[in-house]
Structures are given as structure tokens and as C-alpha cells.
Image (cartoon, rainbow, N blue to C red):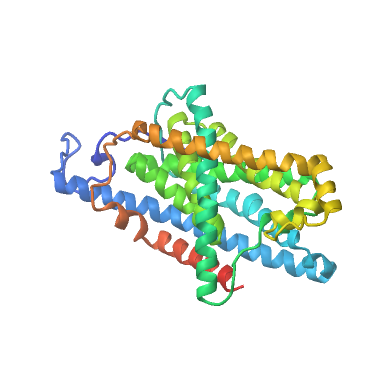
Amino acid sequence: MEDHRPETAEEVYVPEGACTAEETYVPDEETRKAAIVRSARRVFSRMGWACFFMLVIATVLAVALAAIIQLAAPDLLKEAWAAFAISIFSTQLVAMPCACLILKKMPRFIAEPQRFGLGAYLACVPVCVFLAEAGNIGGTILDEFLGRLIGTGTGSVSLETAFIRLPFWALVLLLALVGPFMEELLFRKVLIDRMRGYGEKLAVVTSALMFGLMHGNLVQSVYAFLVGLLFGYVYLRTGRIWGSYGLHFFMNFLTGVLPIQFAKNPLLRDYILGATLETDDAAALGRFLQDPQTALFPLYLLLILLLAAAGLVILIIKARCLRFSESSLQIPKGKAFSAVWLTAGMLFFLLLCLINITYTLLQ
């Protein structure tokens, strides 16, 4: 894989016949800006195509696996977790590595890692919780609003409903270990390394938006976009995926694994899955208060609330401290949207993502 540290636009584009071997071509400002935009369009289009084919591969493989399981064990597909497990295997263990291979030979823009101390990293934890909860609430409201607007109700199945039958170790493996690592590898390391030369802020926002859209439903898309902004910024500053992966692991464990584990308790299941917990009966209320797991659940909710509140305060205070370095290949103002999203690869990726989101809404 080629590492690239371009200094001038001549490295991106030199008109044929513009200079001899002994001469140095120095383009005017408009030519330089046009060259940068052309280079960016090629790069972002290829990244869009890679993610488009990732979704195609994941979809085709998931359908093939479902068909095989339908023939071998049709009752298995009636389980909600089976469809999610097939999706995780097809997307994160097969399709995402394929996308990484497609993009492997593209030049990377390397920058020296900046100082990102333990205190700054720990401050990201409550901020991540706040963004996750804000994204979850916002995505749920939008999902329900559009669902009612078109008369279909909610368009997504909760993780608690899908994975409630799986053992704890399987939840950790699928939701906290394997999935986050592959997502950080593709959407942070591979994509941001190839975007950052055209603008660090652009790289963080674009990779987060692609990360969100890839999830295929409104709730997870909004959630993933917001936390993806933080994951991308942490990766940008550190230059290593272990920082963003640590945050991703923590969030999936806190907001995915633990709620599912709590939902396995019959006294908590209806409450977590959205129903009203019936505690009018004195005996039922006594069992609820005496059960060790149900006693921990209010503490869990309190922890989420405190972390989210702290995260909001930290975000307000530290937002002005965010740093994005300028690049010699920075896309000119007013050209970023067309250079990124109005390219063939990105348009096909966006179209396929919108089809997936619409499909989940119509279910």
C-alpha cells in the first residue's frame, strides 16, 4: 500500500506537454483548484463504489445463506436473531473485508499522530454516551414519525428482541468485539486515511455519514452517524484505530449487550421492549425489588443518565477546542459537496442505502 504525502497540486495533475523534463510546471490558482477537485472526485467515487459493492455482496450472500438455511432448517429463520446473525456474518466478516481489499492500493494520506492524552480520551466516554442516546432518541422519533406517515409503524426490530435468546459470550463476540473492529477498520482507518488529504473535517463527516447510512434503518443510521463523528475525530487525532475501537466496544457493550442481558429477565423484558411493567400486584412488586438483576437495572439507567448529562456538558465546553488541520489539497469552498457526493460511486452507494432504509420502513 502506497503512503502519500502530497505537497502541491502538481502531484495530482500536470497537463500533458505543459513543461519539459528540465522545467517545473507551476499552475495558476484556478488550474490548481480544478486539479484538486478532479482528483477528489476520482478518489471519492472509488470509495463510493467500494462501499456500494460491499452492500451488494452482503445482500447477495445474506439471501443465499437464508435460502440454504430455509432448505436445511426452515424453523431457524423464524428466530429474530438468525436474520441479524446472517447480516453480521455477510456484512462484517465477508463484505467489509472485500471493500478493504478494493481500496487497499489507493494512496493514503499520512499525518503525524498528535498528542491525545488519557484525560482527553476518558472525556470522550461520556460524550459518546450522550451522542448515542441523542441519536437513539432522534432516530426513533424520526422512524416512528415516518412509519406512521406511511402507515407501517416502526421500521426496525430492536436488538433486544433479536438477540434475547443468545448467551452472553455470543452477544459480546457479535456485538462488541467482531462488529466494531471491522467497522473501525473500514470506516475509520481505510476511508479516513484516503480522505483526510482533501480536508480533515470533510473526512470525519463523510466517513461518519457513510457509516450511518450503511446500517440500513433510520434508528441505527442517526445513532451511528453521531457516534461516528466522535470515532472519526479520535482516529484522526491518534492515527490508530485502537482508540476509536475502544470507544466503539464500550458503547456497543453498554447500549447493546447489557440491555439484551437485562431483557432476558422476565421481570424486565416487557419494560425494556417498550411495554409497561405491571407492578400493581404486591407479590409481583416484591419479586421485582428482591431480584438482584432487576435491582441493578435502575442503577444502569442512572449511570446512562449521568454519563449522558456529563457528556453534554463536556461537549459544550470542549467543542471550540476541536482542531482540524489544513491541507495543501483542501477542496475549495463550495466544491466539497459536488466533489464527494455527486460522483458515480457515491451516488450509487447513496441510492442503495436509501433503498435499504425505505425497505425497512415498509416492513
354 and 113: which is toward the camera: 354
- Is residue 328 placed above or below 162 in the rendered structure? above
Q: Is residue 17 left or right of residue 92?
A: left
- Is residue 306 placed above or below 43 in the rendered structure? above
Q: Which residue is located at x 20 percent, y 37 percent?
A: 21
278 and 177: which is toward the camera: 278
Identity of the residue furthest to the bottom in this view: 151
Residue 133 shows in this picture: yes
134 and 94: which is toward the camera: 134
Q: Is residue 208 left or right of residue 40?
A: right
Q: Which residue is located at x 54 percent, y 46 percent?
A: 132
State which quarter of the image contains the C terminus. bottom right
Q: Which residue is located at x 70 percent, y 45 percent?
A: 257
Q: Residue 218, image x and y in percent?
A: 53, 61
- Is residue 362 placed above or below 99 in the rendered structure? below
Q: Is residue 133 left or right of residue 255?
A: left
Q: Which residue is located at x 27 percent, y 51 percent?
A: 37
Residue 187 shows in this picture: no
Q: Residue 273, image x and y in percent?
A: 70, 58
Q: How many marks?
A: 0
Q: Residue 354, image x and y in percent?
A: 48, 66
Q: Residue 126, image x and y in percent?
A: 53, 35
